[in-house]
Structures are given as structure tokens and as C-alpha cells.
Image (cartoon, coloured by chain):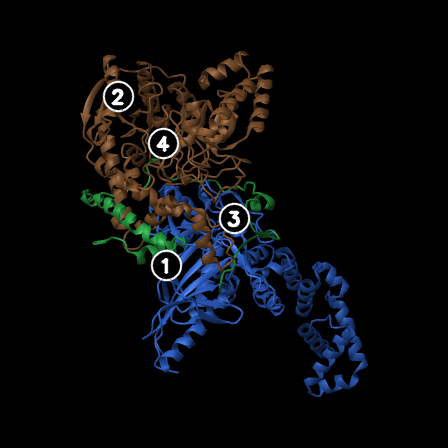
Chain colours: A brown, B green, C blue
Amino acid sequence: MIEAWKTTQRIKNGEDTSVEVVERVFENIKKHEKNVNAYITLEKEKALNQARKIDKAIKNGEDPGPLAGVPIGIKDSISTAGMKTTCGSKTLQNYIPPYDAYTVQQIKEAGGIVIGKTNCDEFCMGSTTETSYFGETRNPLNPDLVPGGSSGGSAAAVSYGGASIALGSDTGGSVRCPAAFCSVVGLKPTYGSVSRHGLVAYGSSLDQIGPITQDVKDAALTYDVISGNDPQDPTSNTTKQNHLQNLEPDPDVTLGIPKQLQEGVDPEIKQKTNEKIDKLRDLGAETKRIDIPSLEYALPAYCIISMSEASSNLARYDGVRYGHRSKSNEDWNTEFSKTRAESFGDEVKRRIILGTYALSAGYYDRYYNKALKIRNLLTKEFKQTFKEVDALISPTMPYKPFEIGEKINDPLSLYMGDALNVPVNMVGNPSITIPTNKNEPIGIQIIGDHHQEQKILNIAKAMEETK
Amino acid sequence: MANEKITEEEVESISSFARISLDDDEIEDLVPQLNEILDYFDKIDEADTEGVEPLFGVHGKKNVFRDDDVGESMSQETALQNAEKTEDGYFKSPRVRD
Amino acid sequence: MTEVDTTIGLEVHIQLNTETKLFCSCSTNYRESPPNTHTCPTCLGLPGTLPKLNKKVVKYGVMAGYALNCEIANEMHFHRKNYFYPDLAKGFQITQYDKPIAKNGEIKLKNDKKIRIRRIQIEEDPGRLVHPISSRYTYTDYNRSGMPLLEIVTEPDLSTPQEARELLNKIREILEYLQIFDGSLEGSLRCDANISIEGGGRAEVKNISSYKGAEKALQYELTRQKNLLRRNKEVKRETRHFNEEQEITRSSRSKEEEHNYRYFPEPDIPNIHITKKLKQQAKQDLPELPDEKRERFIKQYKITTDQAKSLTQTIKWANYYEETAKHTKPETAATWIADVLKGELNYRDKTIHQNKITPKQMAEIVNKLNNDKITEKGATKIIRTMLDNGGTPQEIIKQKNLETIEKDQVQQAIKQAIEENPEAVKDYHNGKQEAINYLVGQVMKITKGKAKPDETNKLITKTLEENA
């Protein structure tokens, strides 16, 4: 599979056509999908029509944009006009949005070809893509293993060549975890730098859309396309920038290694990530062990915040305006309750109940408000830390992909697996994960200060080039 | 379970707030799981947050407004297209008792 | 029934008359439209949509705060109020909680009693439900979903249902003055009321949707509670629904969850700092309020206090009067608008919206009257005809032959009356004053009522004295 930046160049140069590229991707899909199940929806005809338009435009001497002709998978938590958007849930199995998410608009305007919607944990709640109503996605590197989640479909598709790039969404690691497990690159941008307009909300104050790509250069390219100011998202806080143009390997940095993000990490992962860090040190990077005390509370605080917000965000699924509706035909209270009981899977129910509990009268201060205070502490500590270092570095996941079904009945242990990922969502900082080695399901993440995507992309680029 | 944080009755009442009907078996399964998770949440009690303000947004924005200019609405057909039950331009919701 | 202490507090919801909804750019002009034609992904609560705050609503909120003598917040925030109902598109309502836009205000009633305003908050209106009796379903129309509301919460300072109604009217009057509210629109004002009497629990009455309804609901509730206490029964603390048609309140099974809305700060809307600049802008746009206007009218136009009160009751009447007064003598205009025009409309059960007489036409009528071109009777006739059938004053004067006649024509008629009634002339010279009245009547007959009685009286007397 050829990287997107190369693919679009070849299409523009006439060495290749978008139609052929799309056809090849669908051949890959045909070959792998039955084992992997990365997609919920595929739209080959629509994709080919789009590809023909791009090819024609190029023939006419036009420049269709930075993603011209590139086949792209969109996580099914992101709205696509006229294309089913299920968010991995039974409730939305027939839902067709009347509008495109900002990121999808941007991809289309940049000449990208949306080929389908990728599988994910139901409402993005999970880190294995096993909670999807449409069946689990399997790890293309080894189909017995989970691909990570919740953007497992996106990572798997990019990993096996089912898309040049894919969009994921990351509330507490949902881009980075599957990227690590499927050995691809994943970027969780600064909160607010990519519009959430059209992203099915899970934890509103944590959610962020990010690219899953084959390499760092593609991450920069895709990030440039999907980021920018969007008046449809009041928390949108950046303008369009050109990270791709400014992308250059930069090993000459000070990296902080937070000791809390080393705890409980599998020794093999520690070793592989340390090797990677050592290679960067050989190129001139300095490292520093640092202490961010509130990281200790980040995971439980994150769980409380995300579940509380989710309990509210998922209240709209009552079956009246859209979504699954129970056939019960009873009074509204009973019917709503049955509709929702039938609509949601166990993990979603569990989180809604926990979130409802944490916001309830008498518990609000103890849980939600306390978690928000920890969030403030953590934010302050991160700010302080970035006065001393250029970036933080840590393993992306504490363990390697495990077998399908192995942990699904142990929710708490799955939550614990997000420990290294959730802190950046709490504080809004950007983070990029890259594979330690080709086809190795281990990721190393580089965390930057707010809006320092360029810096972490440049560090990641330097690291990527070390072999 | 000793010292349980959340009882079956509470789970029942919370699921009723959340409009998710659960049968007895589901509740029975949920209670120990929820208690285990809530026990873990207790870790936050250890954090010293004396004098710390709650922070509910990390976007750094304030005063984001829209001008009062009318835009296009959707057609009735588009508005209703995803609903299972509609009639005469209305969504049909379950009967609300007075 | 003995008098008992009654405590009433109101939560008044009023729709602001912005062009667009609170969080999306759908038009607010939905009332005549088919259901679900004023919606977009945002106000329909589709997955992935975010609220985009209408700046004008904030400005209107600040204006209302000032007009109701409130402290305006320096910083405000929105919260989510979580509950389920089929009219609520997102399963939560975006409203305000611990940081509302304004608080601690007051409104004065006619008798100078002060009613304290606890808070004013901005929130979104849910959709509208229709419950056909014949159907197993409830029908939902989200055209109203996301309409901007101000909720004005009073302290329990009201003592009678009449005061509650007066307060509602007062709020309407003030907000209409600000031109941020149109009380004539169906459903634009709704309220909930808390009412309790000494020794009883507090009832919260919901679903009141008119000024009259508020008084009726509270009156019913007051009687109900008094009767319970008289029979030594407990008045329960509960929520009751007002049935507008039957004019009664009914207990609505109160649920625990009504007190468990799980409020939390809305993460999708950044904090709002109500800056000095924003406050200044709102203040600049703050028009003259009813009390100030009344005083100015009395001074500027030299009209009576009663007239000024009547003319400043609504901003529309005040503007109508001032526009009329520009083109004619203000004192006469005040009499004819406050006493005659308003009375005639009232008699026809019409409001100023159905007034077919423009201020210019009204001024024309008053001018003609002042210049003796028409009589008072004629002026009244013109007004009535215009209200009933339309037309212009000039047309009606012509059609109904209402123009007063010239002095020499009156003289001519007097001459004729004197000649034709020598008996009456004799009687007059013999000291019978009533004879004059008879002669005036004759003149009116000859002129078909166009002569002015007073003037005719004077002229006859003068003629008879001259010929004596």
C-alpha cells in the first residue's frame, strides 16, 4: 500500500489514476474483509464516481486538492451525508445523516474519496472494537487478536490496505490505541483544532477527531485538511496551517518521560519503546524523567467525566426522530425504556448508568465535580511541565493486542488499559503514536503542548526515520 | 456484597432515570461490576483538590457567538426521513399520558 | 372563609423575538407553518450537532435584566438539564443554573408593592406536542424546538391571583417596550406558579399558558387549598397541572426524578463574559420604559395622568399616539385616542393590531374637528365606519355628508326658523328661555344636524336680541 501523499502525487502526475487506486483498494478489501471486518458500510460505486470526477479534473489541468484521488475510510462515528452513520450501534443501524461532518466536507473539498464507514466500538465505548453491533473487527496483523479501539476499523483498514488513510475519533485513546495495535500512525490533535461538528458525541469535552495513517507525513497531510476554524463548533480554536510543508525531522529536543506513564507497562513494550527513544537520543535528543503527580488520578477522573457526559449525550436516542424503536407500543416512559434497552449493548448501558449515577443529586460533588477539579490540577501540571520539555514520551498502550473475547467481560481491566492514553484527553493536548517497528503492534506516543502539532510531528518524523 | 456502594434498588432507580429497562438478571449482573468500578473511582478521593476550581473545558475559548441571521431549514421530508413513525408531517411519539 | 396568608411565586417563560433560534439559524417565524418545516440537524437533535449561541439573545437578556432592575452577571454559563420527554430533541435542555445572566431584580405593581425577581435565565424551548383524542400516539412538531426563552423567576412575594396576573401583564408591558417580546403571539408567554397558604404544603402549578389562565389557575388552587385546610386535611407538597379548558388543576404523579435533573455545565458552549462593552450596547438600546414615558407624555403633551397611563400601556399605543400627535394638537389627539378610539376597539373586542386607522388619518380627523370641519358626532361616526368597513376619513365625510356647514348657511337656516315659528319668537321675547331650544332644534332639522348646537344657540340669541 502506497502512502496517501505519494498516491496523490502519482495521480496528479498521471502515473496512476484515482479509479485504479480505488479499484486496488477494493481488491484488498475483498481479500481481507471477511477476516478483519473493518467496514460497516462500503460505497464502491459512489467512490468510483468520485474517482472518475477527480481523474477528469486532473486531465483538464485542474488541481482537485491535497488529497486528490486518495481513498479514505471514515469512522462510523462521523456523519456522512447520504451515507449510513451507525456509530457501531443497533440504534443507528438505519440512520442516514442529512449533513456531512466538517471533517468530511474538508476531505471531499480536498479531493479525497470517501469509500466507506469503518467499524468501531458502540458509541466509541471500548478499546477493542468488540462492542460494535456489527460484529468485532479483527487485527489484520493476526486475526485472533483485537485491533484495539474504539477506532479499530479505521486502524485495521489502513493497516491491511483497505484505505490510504482513515479518520478516527479519540475520547480516551480511541485513535492511538488501535493505531498502536495495528502498527500504524495515529494523531489525536489538540482539543478544538479539529471541528467536532458531525462527530457523534461521546464525551463532549474530550472527543477529538484524528487521522490514522501509514506514516507521519500522511498524518501531517490529513491533519492540515481536517483542522481549521469551523463556526459550527463553538470550541473550534485554530486556523488552517501547513504542517506538511513544515514537516522536517527534529531530533534536537528535550523529551520528558513521565514516570507515571511507565507504570504497569509490559516489559517487552518498555524495552521496545526505550530502544526507540535511545535511537532518538543518538541523534541528539535529551531525555528527562519527570513527575506529574496528578496523573495518578487521571484515569478514574477521566472515566467519571466521559461517562457522565455520555449519559447525557446518549439521552437523545429515544427512537422518535431517528434510530431503533421498540415495537412495544406502550406509554412513552415504558416505550422509551424498552427502546433504549433494545438499542444499546452492555458496555453502553454500563457507562450510561455509571454516568447517570455520578451526576445524580448527592453524588455530583463527590464524582463529577471532583473529577473536574483533578482535571484542573492536571492541566496546570502539564502546563508547568511544558516549560521544561518540548514533548512528553511514553508507550501508547501498556500491553500488546490480546485475544478476541479475552477481556470483554472484565470492564475495569479494559478501562485500565487506557491509562496512558486518557491524560491527554483530560488536558486537551495533542499526541501522536507511531509504531516502534514495521508490523509490530506496539506504539510509542509523543505528547505536545497545546497546538504544538508541528513539533510532535517533527519529532515523530525523526523517530520514524530511525530504523 | 459487603460495603457495596450501589445496591440493586439504586441500579433500578438509576436505570429508570436513564430510561433503560433492565430485567432482574441484568441488574444482578451489573451490581458487582458497578461496585468494582465505583471502588476504583474512589481513588480520586485521595487527590487534594482543596481550593481548586472545577475545569470543564480545555479549549481556551470564551464568548463564541453567532449572528442572528436566518439560514436555511431542512424540508419536512428531510426532517422526517429517519423516523420510524410519522404522519401528516409529524413525528409520532408514544402516547404521553396526561 | 377567613383570610389566610397566601404566598405565590412565578416562573415566567417568554419567547424572545429574535430572527433565529437560540442555537441554530432556523427562523423563529414558525407559527403559520406546517409541522417540522423549521428544523435543522441542530434543533432536531441529530447526532453530532453542536449549539451555536445567538448573540442577540444574550443582548436581549441583558436588556431585560436592566429593565427589571437586576444585577447583570459578569460571567455566565449554560448547563444541561437532563430529563426525558418526547418534545425534547436531545434528551436534555440547555438552560442556566448557577450562573444565570441576571439576578436580584424587582418589579413594582400598581399599588407600589415590590415583587422581587430572583433570577433571569436563558434557555431553549422544547418542541410542541399534539395529543389527538382519537390516536394512540402523541404527535411531535419540532418547529418550536430551540426557540429562545427567558425564564424570569420571582420570589414568592405575590399574595393574590390578581397580583399574579398584574405581574404577568407588567412583565409583558416592559418586555414589549424593549421590543424583545411579542405577547400577542400564541404561546409566547407561559408560566409555572408556586402557591401555598399558611399551614399547607406548596403546590407547583404547571402548564399555564395565558395571563387570564394564571389568575384562574391560582384562584382554583387557592380555593382548593383553603377547602382542604378548613376540613383539616393536609395540603400536600406536589406538582399539579392546569387544565386550561376545564379551569382546574390536577395532581401530576410527582416523581423523584423531577428533583434529579443531573445538571452539569454544558461542555459545548464556552463561558460567556458579559463585557462592559456588551452591557453598554444593551443599555444604549434600552428604550424609555413605561413609567418614564408616562411622565414625559404628561409634561410634553400636557395631557392628563389618566390619558398618559392609558396611552403608555403598550409600546404600540404609545408610538401610535406620538405619531398622531406629530400631525395635530396633542391634547385633542390624546382624548380621541385614549377615550374614543381605544373604547371603540375594545367594544369590538379588537386590539391595536386590528386598528385600520393610521396615525396620519387619526390626525386628519382630529384636525378637521379642531377646525370645525366636522362635529364630534361626525368624528365618532368616521372612526366607527373606518373600524368596521375601512376607507379614508375624506371618503366617509363625503359619503355620509358629515362636513359642517358654513356660518352664512346657519344664518340662513336661523332666518328661516324664525320666520316659520313666530310663536316661539314671541315666547322668547316674553321671557321663555326654552323657546331658544325649540328654535335650535328647528335649525338642526333644516341643516340636517350639521350645525353645531352651541354655536346655533348663540347665533339665534344674538339674532333675536338684534331684532327685538
Res A272 label: 2
Q: How far apart, in angstroms, are the residues tagged by discs 2 and 3? A: 50 Å
Q: Chain of mark 1?
A: C
**Could you tell me which quadrant the N terminus of chain A lies in?**
top left
Res A321 label: 3
Q: Is residue A393 left or right of residue C448?
A: left
Q: Nearer the viewer, residue C302 or A172?
A: A172
Residue C347, image x, y percentages: 61, 70
Residue identifier under label 4:
A148
Residue identifier under label 1:
C257
Q: Are marks 2 and 4 on the same chain?
A: yes
Place residue A390 in its image quadrant.
top left
Q: Amino acid at mark 1?
A: Glu
Q: Chain of mark 4?
A: A
Circle 3 sits in a helix, a strand or a loop, which is it? loop
Q: Nearest to the eye among marks 2 and 3: give it.
A: 2
Q: Nearer the viewer, residue C313 or B56?
A: B56
Q: Amino acid at mark 3?
A: Arg
